[in-house]
Amino acid sequence: MWVVYILLCQDGSLYTGITNNLQKRFNEHKKGKGGRYTRSHPPLRIVYQEKIITHPEALKREAEIKSWSKKEKLNLCK
């Protein structure tokens, strides 16, 4: 099982990613060991998560969400 997730960062920005272990990945981001973006934009919390069966489907969904505006991402998080 894969998870597409969105993190709210300290500066108000959003980070979108995928993982097969959300809590572990979030902790890596908080320690500065996650993606390059979250090293300079530390995450505050997980604001969205969506379970997806296969890795290719998760990658496709991640790319779709990343193409959206911040407003669209925030609407998804509601």
Image (spheres, rainbow, N blue to C red):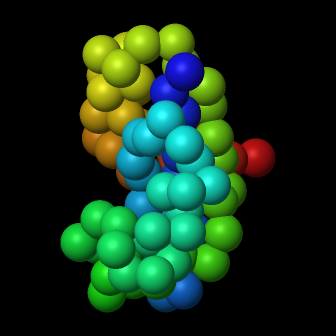
Residue at image coords 42%, 51%: 16
Instruction: Report the side of 22 relative to 60 (left or right).
Output: right
Residue 41 shows up from this direction? yes
Looking at the picture, does residue 62 appear above or below residue 52?
Answer: below
Looking at the picture, does residue 12 appear above or below residue 68?
Answer: below
Residue at image coords 54%, 62%: 26
Residue 70 shows up from this direction? no
Residue at image coords 66%, 69%: 45
Looking at the picture, does residue 50 appear above or below residue 10?
Answer: above
Query: Furthest-right residue in view?
Result: 78
| Residue 3 on image: x %, y % | 54, 33
Instruction: Decide which of 13, 29 is in the foreground and name it.
Output: 29
| Residue 17 on image: x %, y % | 40, 47
| Residue 9 on image: x %, y % | 52, 76
How many badges with numbers are in the image?
0
Query: Furthest-left residue in view?
Result: 36
Looking at the picture, does residue 72 appear above or below residue 45?
Answer: above
Instruction: Decide which of 18, 65 is in the foreground and name it.
Output: 18
Instruction: Report the side of 8 relative to 59 (left or right).
Output: right
Pick the quarter of the image with the N terminus. top right
The quadrant where residue 46 appears = bottom right
Instruction: Report the side of 43 relative to 63 (left or right).
Output: right
Residue at image coords 40%, 24%: 58
